[in-house]
Image: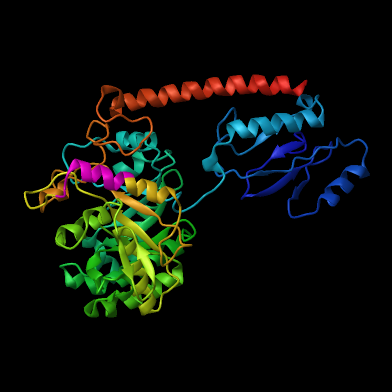
Amino acid sequence: NDRQNPLVWQPARPQLLLPVVTGQPRRLFRGRESRERVENHYKKTEREEKFYLSYGMAFLSSNKHFIGGMVGTSIVLSPKAMKFSSRSVVRFLLVFSIFFIPNELLIVQAFTGTYGINYGRIADNIPSPDKVATLLRAAKIKNVRIYDADHSVLNAFSGTGLELEIGLPNGYLKNMSANADHALSWVKENVEAFLPETRIRGIAIGNEVLGGGDQGLWGDLLGAAKNIYNATKELQLTDLIQISTAHSQAVFDHSYPPSSCIFRENIVQYMKPLLEFFSQIGSPFCLNAYPFLAYMGNTDEIDINYALFQSNQGIYDQKTDLHYDNMLDAQIDAAYAALEVAGFKEMEVIVTETGWASNGDQNEAAATVNNARTYNYNLRKRLAKRKGTPMRPKMVLKAYVFAVFNEDLKPGPASERNFGLFKPDGSISYDIGFAGLKSSSAASSLLSLKDIQTRGWSGSYSLVLLTACASILLLFL
């Protein structure tokens, strides 16, 4: 009861909240209101304690509690607890908030940071989804893409804080395009039913449909995207869920130099209406970009160092007067060039797949552990810089690496089965800078990760106790 508990912090969207301690019903001023109004309010009644806290509170969840370091709907201090001075209260709360409010509670984004990973499961030797969730949290990889909406994965990721993009498989496109009711049912069963505990942030409609071998699906892509979007709209999920589709390099023509790139003639009639729709709903252009594949297709003319982010002469685009020192930037700017020609200059490009195989067939000599380590390590460094490409320097590059594990059941050349960053036991395949994870040791296995997590919680509780004691001591300084 607010009348019985004068100081109440309510969870809110990020904004400045000024709680007022009085013996009267709670009054709460928004930060956009002037400080003079707050001070005038205090002067009206001498019985009121002069206290205000100009500190932004941004709690995310309305169904969890933040007590002793946990997320919460409210923190309530009774009048009996308010025996110390206002200055002491402010000091205590500032110390408390600095140590106990997790950073991820302060900002909500569809794509947190710049780095994500694809979690493919065409394999018979990989861990269960709950162990994968533990692994990804230990590796501090927050953004995850899957290629379906498997309920075992959605359940396993519940409550983990991982941001998930699910997929509508290509085989569903005809049905979803032709039947809006089926699209609504699919969203209800595979998205709405798991929110908000599972943080589903996007739905990928098919994968590499345009330019793919099944041309019968090309005309179904837009209809499926519209029906899935309309389903999220009917369920009031459009503010949470982003609709997109990922394209391969097969949709482009004349991609070298980057500024000359356009969409293929037989693709344009399908691509432009799709881009128009995505532009209207604020979706990005999603690109699967593989310097590995481009290099393998032209090893005589492409410097492998250019593909691996290593030192090289790079290429020069005379039309734009831009220099490229790595192939990934060039591939992304080729997409930007094609979008501009098509009339969508402002659309963002996000890399939904990129990576390098660590093993391959005899004719795939570049698929080595050393090259895979080099590419993926340098990719992480590139993304950590939080910068754009030469053509779009202010558009921060975001990318999902491919993939979590090798997938031993995938068809095609051997390289297709060897893109994994992690081994089935949870250890890393090669070191690209994941803090706290080892390349090969029992301590870095998935089973041990649970122990690591438990020790982390124990350490957190110890930190809570120590900091609380320190905060209490500060009250009397």
User: Which quarter shows the C terminus?
Assistant: top right
Residue at 91% in and 35% down: 47
Residue at 24% in and 62% down: 172
- Residue 368 magenta-highlighted: yes
- Magenta stretch in the rendered image: 366-377
> Residue 421 vs residue 57: left or right?
left
Residue 315 lies, in percent from the top left, at 30, 65
Residue 286 lies, in percent from the top left, at 34, 62
Residue 265 lies, in percent from the top left, at 24, 80
Name the foreground residue: 86 vs 374: 374
Q: Is residue 150 visible?
A: no
> Residue furthest toward the front?
313
- Residue 343 magenta-highlighted: no
Residue 16 lies, in percent from the top left, at 69, 48
Residue at 45% in and 63% down: 393
Locate residue 323: give its quadrant. Answer: bottom left
* Image coloring type: rainbow
Name the foreground residue: 384 vs 71: 384
Q: Please, what is the dominant secondary structure of the magenta stretch?
A: helix
Name the foreground residue: 325 vs 25: 325
Q: Is residue 418 visible?
A: yes
> Residue 305 vs residue 9: left or right?
left
Locate residue 10: give its quadrant. Answer: top right
Say above or below: 350 vs 419.
below
Say above or below: 456 vs 127.
above
